[in-house]
């Protein structure tokens, strides 16, 4: 059974920091990317950060220099260190895992964790 479980969200003041974690288990295919999309009320979903199997990272312009994505391959866990948080970072943060079996792509999502940044 595949499980993708996020943790670490919460309420923080502007300028503060949070660290999100996402543990993926039960995925039998090769994981290619792990990512953190976020969804804020009334806004389009935004892909905040992505990390590939070889460690390459990519960030949305809105979080560059403030957020850092990293992973622990042995644990199939991805992290998102969020510093200098702003009220506009308030959103539900999801963990998205993409795996491949030959040419077939499999996408798995967690339930999301709420991040609220107060001004």
Image: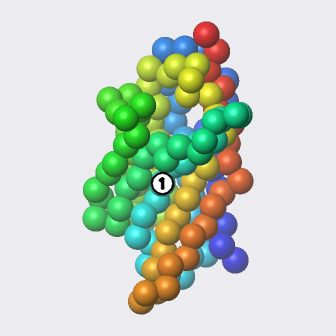
Image coordinates of residue 4 in percent, x first then y, are 63, 61
Residue bearing mark 1:
35
Judge whether 42 appears above or below 56 on screen. Answer: above
Image coordinates of residue 115 in percent, x first then y, are 64, 32
Residue drawn at (41%, 52%), measured in percent from left and top?
50
Picture quadrant where residue 23 is located: bottom right
Judge whether 32 appears above or below 19 on screen. Answer: below
Comparing 20 with 59, the one in front is: 59
Q: Number of labelled discs?
A: 1
Image coordinates of residue 85 in percent, x first then y, are 50, 22
Image coordinates of residue 87 in percent, x first then y, are 58, 19
The answer to whether one can see residue 75 in this image is no
Picture quadrant where residue 103 is located: bottom left
In which quadrant is the C terminus drawn? Answer: top right
Judge whether 12 appears above or below 77 on screen. Answer: above
Residue farthest along the bottom direction in this orientation: 102
Comparing 109 with 44, the one in front is: 44
The answer to whether one can see residue 31 in this image is yes
What secondary structure is marked by label 1? strand
Q: How is the image coloured?
A: rainbow
Residue drawn at (68%, 48%), measured in percent from left and top?
112
In which quadrant is the N terminus drawn? Answer: bottom right
Residue drawn at (37%, 35%), measured in percent from left and top?
61
Residue farthest along the top direction in this orientation: 119
Picture quadrant where residue 69 is located: top left
Left or right, 37 with reference to 71: right
Residue drawn at (42%, 89%), measured in percent from left and top?
102
How many residues crowd mark 1 within 10 Å: few (<14), some (14–19), many (20+)? Answer: many
């Amino acid at each position: 059974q595949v499980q993708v479980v996020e943790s670490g969200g919460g309420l923080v003041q502007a300028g503060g920091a949070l660290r999100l974690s996402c543990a993926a288990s039960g995925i039998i295919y090769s994981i290619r990317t792990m990512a953190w999309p976020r969804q804020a009320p009334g806004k389009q979903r935004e892909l905040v950060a992505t990390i590939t199997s070889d460690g390459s990272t990519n960030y949305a312009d809105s979080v560059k220099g403030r957020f850092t994505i990293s992973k622990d391959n042995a644990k199939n866990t991805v992290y998102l260190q969020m510093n200098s948080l702003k009220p506009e970072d308030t959103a539900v943060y999801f963990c998205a895992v993409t795996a491949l079996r030959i040419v077939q792509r499999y996408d798995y999502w967690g339930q999301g964790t709420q991040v609220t940044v107060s001004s």
